[in-house]
Image (spheres, rainbow, N blue to C red):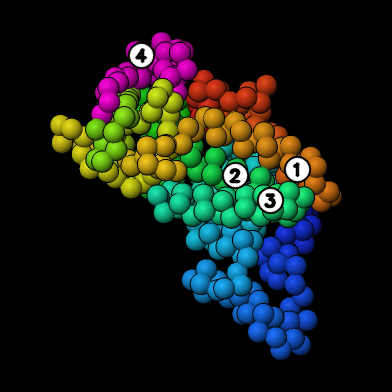
Amino acid sequence: MRRFYVRIAVLLCMASILWACGDNMFETLGDDTSAAACRYETTKALDNKQYGAVLNSPCATALDRGAVYLGLAEFNVYDVIDRMIDANAQSNNAAQISTYLDALIANVSNAKFTNLYAAQAAYQGVLVTDPAYADADFYLDVVINPLIALANVKSVIDTDGLGDISACDINGNLIPDEADATACVLLDLGGAGCSAGVGATDGGAAIAALTNATVGTFTGYTGYTVTLNGVGTAACPAVFRNLTHTGVLVTTSSDMCSADAGATYQWNCPFETSPGTPVDIVTTLSSVLATAEASLGTLNIGIANSTVLDAIAELRADACGPDGVCTSNDLAAYLQTLSIN
């Protein structure tokens, strides 16, 4: 019952974005002007998820386009708020991180990232012209940006692109192997070390760096290959690969790029916000969670503010440590709280 009231509070706050964007639908029905008719048709198309019609509408606003791109990324504000509430209600970190990375974030393709970043740009555009627009601020900092950060994290522990966190545990430490492998890379990048189990809690992963591996048309990346202890199978491999750029772990997608220079295997494609500019997962996570927490603290949306603020604050503390500033080692520790299903 509490979740119902929380959702109502949030959705009432967001109504001007998801529907008439400030207009009264019944007023437009009584207005015969072409501008009013255009707004009505655009609003109706958005409500019916006719996204192409909205993007082609001459009277679509930046708020309309932001909602479209979020929909094209296969997210909606109802589900995001529900999952935050679910995570906040969990009694341990393992259940909380599973809620975010399993229940909320599914398969992450380049198309999904492209649409999430397009939604981000749309709402940033609104705030450039109207910095006090609270609805746009909420949508950007509390919905879209955390989604981007969590999708970035999911991308590097779901290299097979299946969308779920697997129950594979060939090294027998009760942590999903894909989380072990990614944590190993993060530990190495963070200076803690992850070689033959030194500085790692993943049962003794061995790591080897492939300097400046060529990944299709992408250059300038370093590929990390992590081999876990235990016997791999077709369903539960022992070998995992992640990409780094200038010493940081970067976002990849479920899309596969062409083979490495030796043509022996493929890499997951890095997502780039512009040519040669990948996404630094740790920095992005740190900055967007800090901004989301600060934004929620200034919004007056009653019980929804309190519940979602608690979820954001707990996610930030768990993923980034007590100081709220994420490091590679912090994120490695967070991933190691995942447990096999």
* Residue contact between numbered discs 3 and 1, judged by CB atoms under 8 Å: no
What residue is disc 1 on?
296
Q: Is residue 266 left or right of residue 205?
A: left
- Residue to which mark 4 is pinned: 195
Residue at (46%, 36%) from the top-left corner?
279
**Residue 39 left/right relative to 302:** left
> How far across and how far down the image is residue 217, in percent?
26, 41
Q: CA distance from mark 4 to mark 2?
A: 34 Å
Distance CA(mark 4)–CA(mark 1):
41 Å
Please tell me how crowded label 1 is: few (under 14), some (14-19), or many (20+) other residues with Cα within 10 Å.
many
| Residue type at the position of mark 4 | Ser
- Residue 276's quadrant in the figure? top left
Query: Of tags 2 and 3, which is closer to the observer?
Result: 3
- Residue receiving disc 3: 127
Query: Closer to us: mark 4 or mark 1?
Result: 1
**Residue 248 at x, y percent in the picture:** 44, 26
* Mark 3 → mark 1, Cα distance in angstroms: 16 Å
Q: Which residue is mark 2?
A: 145
Q: Amino acid at mark 1?
A: Leu
Quarter of the rendering occupied by the N terminus: bottom right
| Helix, strand or loop under label 4 | loop
Q: Which residues are magenta?
A: 184-213
Labels 3 and 1: the sequence-earlier one: 3
Residue 189 appears in the rendering: yes
Mark 2 → mark 3, Cα distance in angstroms: 14 Å
Secondary structure under tag 1 reads helix
Label 2: state its secondary structure.
Answer: helix
Q: Main secondary structure of the magenta part?
A: loop
Type of amino acid at the residue the image marks with label 3:
Leu
